[in-house]
């Protein structure tokens, strides 16, 4: 015979009370967690957006070159690798370095001067530029690789020191500048890069083929 419902409830009540009292209770001897430990914030150190970006916020690199009949042209690229706009105006300050990192006694001209009159971009007037993050400007160096005065030492550097302007921090750029004995280097102003359309139009490899006259 089953016990009455009231009697079964009376038997189970003490058991349920013990189970309920034991839920969520830490074993004896276990210290309660401290609120300070649970809520203590971790110190955060924001990582730089571009680890390879100098403190100045700009990076100078070589931008290709050309050589023909002793005339040398070397491009420079200044990229805004920082997080804000960068104002640029004038000419880069350039020095040609020897194997010990010391500058050669080189005469640096703003423009082509007596070196050549064929590169109008080097003689153009500088204009103020404002580079947004990720944008860049270019400049060009020109010289002649001539050995015509054996009384003067050769100035053939494999690195150059470039700063955006006089008095600003300089960066060393791997670049071969073989001045020979001329001792003269022409520096062009910072300019906006040429648009791709102009560069493509100037590329003779993209010109259409002429008419076929072979018959």
Image (cartoon, grey):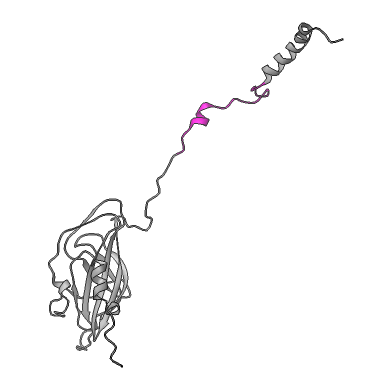
Residue span colored magenta: 23-42
Q: Residue furthest bottom?
A: 215
Q: Is residue 214 left or right of residue 124?
A: right
Residue 115, how many percent across, how many down? 16, 80
- Which residue is nearer to you in this view: 90 or 203? 203
- Residue 177 appears in the figure: no
- Report if residue 207 lies within the magenta region: no
The quarter of the image holding the C terminus is bottom left
Q: Is residue 174 depicted above or below 68 in this figure?
A: above
Question: Which residue is drawn at the image coordinates 66% and 21% (left, top)?
Answer: 23
- Which residue is nearer to you in this view: 159 or 154? 159
Q: Is residue 50 depicted above or below 138 in this figure?
A: above
Residue 50, how many percent across, how many down? 37, 55
Q: Is residue 152 depicted above or below 17 in this figure?
A: below
Count every numbered label the image shows and give the total: 0
Question: Which residue is drawn at the image coordinates 26% and 54% (left, top)?
Answer: 132
Residue 184, how many percent across, how many down? 18, 78
- Report if residue 37 lies within the magenta region: yes
Q: Residue furthest right?
A: 1
Residue 128 quadrant: bottom left
Q: Is residue 205 left or right of residue 41?
A: left
The quarter of the image holding the N terminus is top right
Q: Is residue 143 depicted above or below 169 in this figure?
A: below
Residue 28 quadrant: top right
- Which residue is nearer to you in this view: 116 or 196? 196
Question: Which residue is drawn at the image coordinates 24% and 85% (left, top)?
Answer: 70
- Residue 79 appears in the figure: yes
Residue 191, how many percent across, how many down? 20, 65
Residue 169 quadrant: bottom left
Specify the principal SS of the magenta part. loop
Q: Is residue 84 left or right of residue 36?
A: left
């Amino acid at each position: 015979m089953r016990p009455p419902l009231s009697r079964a409830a009376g038997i189970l009540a003490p058991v349920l009370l013990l189970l309920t009292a034991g839920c969520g209770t830490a074993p004896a001897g276990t210290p309660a967690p401290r609120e300070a430990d649970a809520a203590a914030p971790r110190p955060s150190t924001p990582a730089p957006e571009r680890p390879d970006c100098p403190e100045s916020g700009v990076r100078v690199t070589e931008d290709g070159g050309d050589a023909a009949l002793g005339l040398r042209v070397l491009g420079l690229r200044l990229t805004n690798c920082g997080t804000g706009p960068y104002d640029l105006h004038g000419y880069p300050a350039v020095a040609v370095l020897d194997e010990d990192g010391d500058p050669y006694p080189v005469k640096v001209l703003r423009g082509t001067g007596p070196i050549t009159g064929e590169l109008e971009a080097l003689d153009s007037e500088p204009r103020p530029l404002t580079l947004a993050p990720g944008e860049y400007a270019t400049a060009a160096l020109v010289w002649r690789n001539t050995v015509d005065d054996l009384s003067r030492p050769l100035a053939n550097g494999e690195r150059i020191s470039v700063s955006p302007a006089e008095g600003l921090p300089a960066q060393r750029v791997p670049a071969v500048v073989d001045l020979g004995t001329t001792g003269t280097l022409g520096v062009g102003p910072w300019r906006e890069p040429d648009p791709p359309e102009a560069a493509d139009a100037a590329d003779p490899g993209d010109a259409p083929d002429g008419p076929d006259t072979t018959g």
